[in-house]
């Protein structure tokens, strides 16, 4: 068995540590949630280089429930593993509140009020589509934009077309 010198051992250890630090810097996908609160930051991050230019056949639809609640649905051609979805006002702030999340999703605190204004995945398990969410606006709401990105695999991301909603 060949022995490596102490000097060589420390050099290899330093290379491994530096590599791990670099990898952690460039990784924006987390198995337990989206790494950011902003769809555009995900697309424009180094990891976003995997974002496919089209919506991949995925879409957002809305249906008015008992006013003012709105059902927001994500549908598409295949199951997803990750997601980030929120409603944004004209100032770019997340607002309103999602009222439900299934066992594979969780609320993400985004914004100053810490409400349940953003949903993300809580695991990398497959999520069958369509996914339906109930969303309630804040009082005085007039309009907003639903924004979302879905992850099919580590190398296939789709930014969904924004959907304008109004009261």
Image (spheres, grey):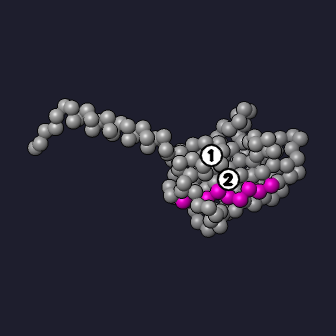
Instruction: In this rendered view, identify the residue nearer to me: 12 or 59.
Output: 12
Outermost residue, left direction?
A: 1
- Please indicate, yes or no, whether residue 67 appears anywhere in the rendered image: no
Looking at the rendering, which quadrant does residue 10 occupy?
top left
Q: Residues within 10 Å of mark 2 (few under 14, many from 20)?
A: many
Say if the magenta span includes residue 159. Answer: yes
Instruction: In this rendered view, identify the residue nearer to me: 77 or 164.
Output: 164
Judged left or right of residue 63, residue 160 is: left
Residue 88 higher or lower than 49, as above or below: above
Residue drawn at x 71%, y 59% is 161
Where's residue 43, x and y in %?
61, 51
Where's residue 18, x and y in %?
38, 37
According to the picture, the residue beneath numbered tag 1 turns out to be: 41
According to the picture, the residue beneath numbered tag 2 turns out to be: 148
Q: Which residues are magenta?
A: 156-164
Q: CA distance from mark 1 to mark 2?
A: 12 Å
Say if the magenta span includes residue 113. Answer: no
Q: Secondary structure at mark 2?
A: strand
Judged left or right of residue 123, residue 1 is: left
Instruction: In this rendered view, identify the residue nearer to me: 3 or 7.
Output: 7
């Amino acid at each position: 068995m060949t022995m490596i010198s102490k000097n060589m051992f420390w050099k290899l250890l330093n290379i491994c540590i530096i590599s791990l630090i670099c990898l952690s810097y460039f990784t924006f996908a987390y198995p337990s949630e989206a790494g950011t609160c902003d769809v555009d930051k995900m697309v424009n991050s180094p990891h976003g280089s995997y974002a496919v230019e089209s919506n991949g056949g995925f879409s957002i639809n809305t249906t008015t429930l008992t006013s003012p609640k709105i059902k927001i649905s994500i549908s598409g051609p295949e199951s997803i593993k990750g997601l980030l979805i929120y409603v944004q006002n004209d100032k770019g702030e997340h607002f309103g509140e999602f009222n439900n999340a299934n066992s594979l999703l969780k609320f993400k605190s985004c914004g100053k009020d810490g409400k349940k204004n953003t949903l993300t995945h809580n695991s990398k398990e497959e999520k069958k589509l369509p996914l339906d969410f109930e969303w309630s606006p804040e009082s005085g709401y007039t309009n907003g934009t639903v924004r979302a990105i879905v992850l099919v695999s580590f190398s296939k991301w789709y930014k969904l077309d924004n959907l304008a909603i109004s009261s």
